[in-house]
Amino acid sequence: TYTNPAGAISTQTFTITVSTSTTPPVGTPIVPYVYVNGTWTQTASASVSSGATVNLGPQPTTGGSWTWTGPNGFTSKLREIDNIPLSVGANVYIATYTNPAGAISTQTFTITVL
């Protein structure tokens, strides 16, 4: 309410709505794919022989952004990583996907070289 110098009164009503939702954005499921010597398979792990060609290509393929970590300080910002460096034993790579809403999902890939 406001009263001006002449004594006229005016009133204005304001409505404020406060959301009580604190639900964070929902992460996008990552579908793991591993390419071994020419064939893509929907899996997050594989056992391969020394010298095998291995690519990791998770989905979704569009939107958002990707980051990877792996053995020996490996990092990448590509969705698909080709000819990943492998050594004998278990090689663990972690894919992190940030969807357009900012929610983060991770997927662990384990490639074991026999």
Image: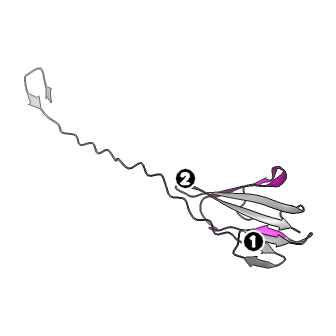
The residue carrying mark 2 is: 102
Foreground disc of the pair 2, 1: 1
Circle 2 sits in a helix, a strand or a loop, which is it? Answer: loop
Circle 1 sits in a helix, a strand or a loop, which is it? Answer: strand
Mark 2: amino acid: Gly
Q: Position of residue 1 (x, y in %)?
A: 15, 30
Q: Position of residue 36 (x, y in %)?
A: 81, 74
Q: Nearer the viewer, residue 62 or 58?
A: 58
Residue 55 is inside the magenta segment: yes
Q: Residue drawn 52% across and 55% down?
A: 101
Q: Is residue 98 visible?
A: yes
Q: Position of residue 47 (x, y in %)?
A: 82, 71
In the picture, residue 98 is in which quadrant? bottom right
Q: Is residue 55 above or below residue 101?
A: below
Q: Nearer the viewer, residue 12 or 61?
A: 61
Question: Which numbered tag is attached to residue 84?
Answer: none
Q: Is residue 83 visible?
A: no
The residue carrying mark 1 is: 34
